[in-house]
Amino acid sequence: MPDAPQLDPEDAKLVTLARATRARTGAAEGAAVRDLDGRTYAAATVDLESLKVSALQVCVAMAVASGSRGLAAAVVLGDAPDLAAPDRAVLDEWAPDAVVLLGDPRGAIRG
């Protein structure tokens, strides 16, 4: 088994926020982002009959609504091996240079 990647302390903080948010809500995914000013946002998947939004999309919406100009980093934790197309599109449009880390629900980042 390959060693887990060594994370920058600020990225490790995002992993902790995403893991805690997902665990607290029991959602399919947890995500956390750091904007260009260093502010962090964490969210879980919203899966209502009338509203379905990924954890990453919620984080980006919160950042945009708070006046953020972009993202420096994003962490998404869940069972999916890769980002869903809508999440990739959001990052391509609004945060193309962001560091993106994907991990399992326990917070183990995939190499």
Image (spheres, grey):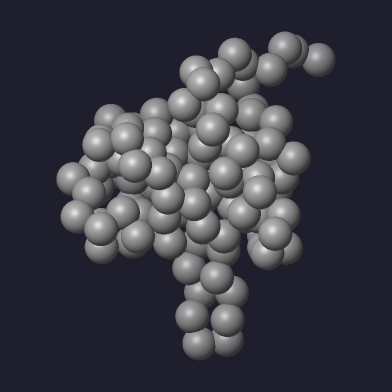
Query: In the image, what residue occupies the spot 61% across and 38% down?
Result: 16
Residue 67 in the image: state x and y as whole percent. 19, 55
Q: Residue 103: which quarter of the image?
A: top right
Considering depth in this image, is 21 or 75 the residue closer to the camera? 21
Which quarter of the image is occupied by the N terminus? Answer: top right
Q: Quadrant location of the C terminus? A: top right
State the count of labels: 0
Q: Could you tell me which residue is drawn at 57 percent across and 86 percent down?
A: 49
Residue 67 vs residue 5: left or right? left
Q: Residue at x 68, y 64 (%)?
A: 25
From this viewpoint, which residue is outermost toward the right? Answer: 1
Return the x and y of residue 7 as percentages of the image width and height. 55, 19
Judged from this view, the residue extending furthest toward the bottom is 50
Residue 95 falls in which quadrant of the image? top left
Would you identify the image quadrant in which residue 71 lies? top left
> Looking at the image, can residue 96 be seen?
no
Frontmost residue, 42 versus 28: 42
Q: Is residue 43 above or below residue 100?
A: below
Q: Closest to the observer: 8 or 46?
A: 8
Residue in view at x 74 percent, y 40 percent: 106
Classify 85 as above or below 10. Answer: below
Residue 68 visible? The answer is yes
Residue 73 at x, y = what percent?
39, 34
3 with respect to 44 (left or right): right
Question: Does 111 sit left or right of 67 as displayed?
Answer: right
Is 5 placed left or right of 83 in the picture? right
